[in-house]
C-alpha cells in the first residue's frame, strides 16, 4: 500500500506543479459574471488581470527557481494541456457571449461595451499569449490551434511577423516590434500596427520567392489567415447580426492593444550590437527585459521570462529559465504594472530610461553614440 501511495504521489506531482498556471481559467467565469450581472461587475476581468495580479506580485514576490531542462515530455503534459484546453473554452465563451449579450435586455450600451472590453482583456492577455506558446511548437495541431486563437482577435498575421521577423531582427531597426528608446507607446502603437502587417506579408512573400513561387501561391499562410478570420466574422454575424460584428470587433481591438502593450514593454530601448555590413550580434538574454514576478508569471505562463524565450525560442514555457541582472536586464515590476505605466509616457520614461542607459553602460561601454544602432530612435541626453 505504501508503494502504491508513493507511485500515486509521483504521478500527481507534475499536476500539482502545473496547477498555478491554470488560474487563467478564472477569467472566463469573471467575464460571464459581468455579462449576467451588468453594472460594475463588468470590470471584474480588468480588476483581476491588472490590479489583483499586481497586488499578488507584491505579496508573493519573485520566483528565481529554474526548472530542470531534462524534464521529460510526460512531465510536461499538464502544462501543454492548459494551452490546448483554452482554445475551445475561449471559442465557446466568445461566441456564447455574443449570443447572450445581443439579447440581454438588462444591459445598456455601456455595459455591453464593458462586457466585450473585458472579453478582449481575456482573449488578449490569455488567448494571444497562449497562441504565442502554440505557434512555437513543431506539432501541427498546436500550431493550428494557435492560428485559431489569433483569428478570434483578427490578428492572424502575428504568427508570420513573430516567427519570421521579430525573432530574427529583434533589437534592430528591421523589427517593427522592438520599441525604440524614448518612443512613447502612443507613437509606437500606430507604427507597429502598420509596419508589422507589411513586414509579415513581405517575409512570407520573400520565402515563396526563394522557392520560385508567387505571393498568391496557395501555400502562403495569409490565405489561411484571411479564411479563418472571414469564417469567424461570418459566424459572429450569423449569431447576432451587425451587433455581433461590433461585439467581435471590440474584443479584438482590446486584445490587439493588450498584445502590443506587452510587446512594447518586452524590448523597450534594447538594441543588438551592429557588426557591420548589415549584420548584428546573435540574440542573447540581455536583449529582452526579464521579470521574475511569481503571480504574473503564473497568469502569463512565464512570458515574463522573455530573455530566455528569445535566447531559446523552442523551449516550452515551464522550462524557460530565469536570469539575474548579470545576464539580462530586469523590470522593476511585473507586466500588469509595467503595461499600465506604459500608457503614461512621462511616467514610463522616468522608470525605464535610466534603466536603459544603465544597460548600455553595463553591456556596451565601448559604444558612445547609439543613434548608429537604431536610426528611428530619438536619443535622450545622458
Image (spheres, rainbow, N blue to C red):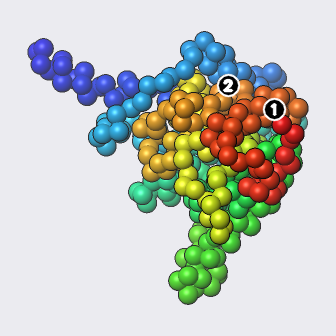
Task: Residue at the far front: name it.
Answer: 366
- For the point 51% across and 41% down, the residue is 308
- For the point 49% across and 53% down, the residue is 136
**Depth check: 167 or 294 in front?**
167
- For the point 74% across and 36% down, the residue is 357
Quick one: quadrant of the N terminus?
Answer: top left
**Depth check: 40 or 183 in front?**
183
- The answer to whether residue 224 is left or right of residue 37 is left
Quick one: quadrant of the C terminus?
Answer: top right
Crowding near pointer 2: few (<14 within 10 Å), some, many (20+)? some
User: For mark 1, what is the residue?
Assistant: 348
- For the point 50% across and 23% down, the residue is 63
Give the vertical position of 219 relative to 11 (above or below): below
Q: Quadrant of residue 168?
A: bottom right
Q: Can residue 101 be seen in this view?
A: no
Residue 326 image offset from top left, x and y in percent? 54, 32
Q: In which quarter of the image is residue 214?
A: bottom right
Residue 345 image offset from top left, x and y in percent? 86, 35
User: For mark 2, what is the residue?
Assistant: 332
**Depth check: 28 or 58 in front?**
58
Residue 277 image offset from top left, x and y in percent? 65, 69
Asked whether the beta carbons under mark 1 and mark 2 sit within 8 Å of each other, the answer is no
- The answer to whether residue 142 is left or right of residue 372 is left
- The kind of secondary structure element at disc 1 is helix
Q: In which quarter of the image is residue 77?
A: top left
Crowding near pointer 1: few (<14 within 10 Å), some, many (20+)? some
Give the vertical position of 297 relative to 69 (above or below): above
Q: How many marks?
A: 2
- The kind of secondary structure element at disc 2 is loop
Dot placed on the residue nearer the N-terminal end, 1 or 2: 2
Q: Which mark is residue 268?
A: none
Q: How far apart are marks 1 and 2 (CA)?
A: 12 Å
Amino acid at each position: 500500500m505504501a508503494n502504491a501511495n508513493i507511485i500515486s504521489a509521483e504521478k500527481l506531482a507534475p499536476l500539482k506543479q502545473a496547477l498555478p498556471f491554470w488560474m487563467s481559467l478564472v477569467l472566463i467565469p469573471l467575464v460571464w459574471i459581468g455579462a449576467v450581472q451588468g453594472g460594475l461587475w463588468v470590470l471584474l476581468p480588468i480588476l483581476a488581470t491588472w490590479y489583483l495580479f499586481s497586488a499578488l506580485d507584491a505579496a508573493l514576490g519573485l520566483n528565481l527557481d529554474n526548472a530542470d531542462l531534462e524534464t521529460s515530455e510526460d512531465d510536461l503534459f499538464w502544462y501543454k494541456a492548459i494551452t490546448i484546453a483554452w482554445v475551445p473554452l475561449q471559442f465557446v465563451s466568445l461566441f456564447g457571449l455574443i449570443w447572450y449579450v445581443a439579447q440581454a435586455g438588462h444591459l445598456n450600451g455601456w455595459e455591453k461595451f464593458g462586457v466585450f472590453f473585458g472579453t478582449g482583456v481575456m482573449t488578449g492577455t490569455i488567448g494571444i499569449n497562449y497562441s504565442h506558446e502554440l505557434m512555437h511548437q513543431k506539432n501541427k495541431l498546436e500550431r493550428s490551434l494557435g492560428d485559431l486563437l489569433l483569428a478570434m482577435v483578427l490578428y492572424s498575421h502575428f504568427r508570420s511577423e513573430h516567427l519570421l521577423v521579430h525573432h530574427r531582427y529583434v533589437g534592430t531597426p528591421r523589427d517593427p516590434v522592438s520599441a525604440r528608446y524614448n518612443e512613447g507607446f502612443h507613437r509606437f502603437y500606430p507604427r507597429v500596427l502598420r509596419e508589422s502587417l507589411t513586414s509579415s506579408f513581405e517575409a512570407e512573400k520573400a520565402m515563396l520567392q526563394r522557392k520560385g513561387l508567387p505571393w498568391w501561391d496557395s501555400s502562403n499562410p495569409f490565405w489561411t489567415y484571411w479564411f479563418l478570420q472571414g469564417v469567424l466574422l461570418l459566424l459572429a454575424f450569423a449569431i447576432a447580426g451587425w451587433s455581433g460584428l461590433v461585439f467581435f470587433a471590440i474584443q479584438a481591438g482590446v486584445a490587439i492593444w493588450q498584445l502590443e502593450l506587452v510587446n512594447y514593454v518586452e524590448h523597450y530601448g534594447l538594441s543588438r550590437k551592429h557588426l557591420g555590413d548589415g549584420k548584428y550580434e546573435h540574440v542573447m538574454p540581455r536583449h529582452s527585459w526579464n521579470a521574475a514576478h511569481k503571480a504574473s508569471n503564473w497568469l502569463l505562463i512565464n512570458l515574463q521570462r522573455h530573455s530566455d524565450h528569445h535566447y531559446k525560442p523552442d523551449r516550452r514555457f515551464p522550462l524557460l529559465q530565469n536570469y539575474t541582472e548579470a545576464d539580462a536586464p530586469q523590470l522593476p515590476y511585473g507586466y500588469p504594472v509595467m503595461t499600465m505605466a506604459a500608457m503614461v509616457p512621462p511616467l514610463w520614461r522616468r522608470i525605464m530610461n535610466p534603466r536603459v542607459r544603465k544597460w548600455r553602460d553595463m553591456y556596451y561601454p565601448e559604444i558612445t553614440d547609439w543613434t548608429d544602432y537604431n536610426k528611428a530612435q530619438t536619443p535622450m541626453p545622458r
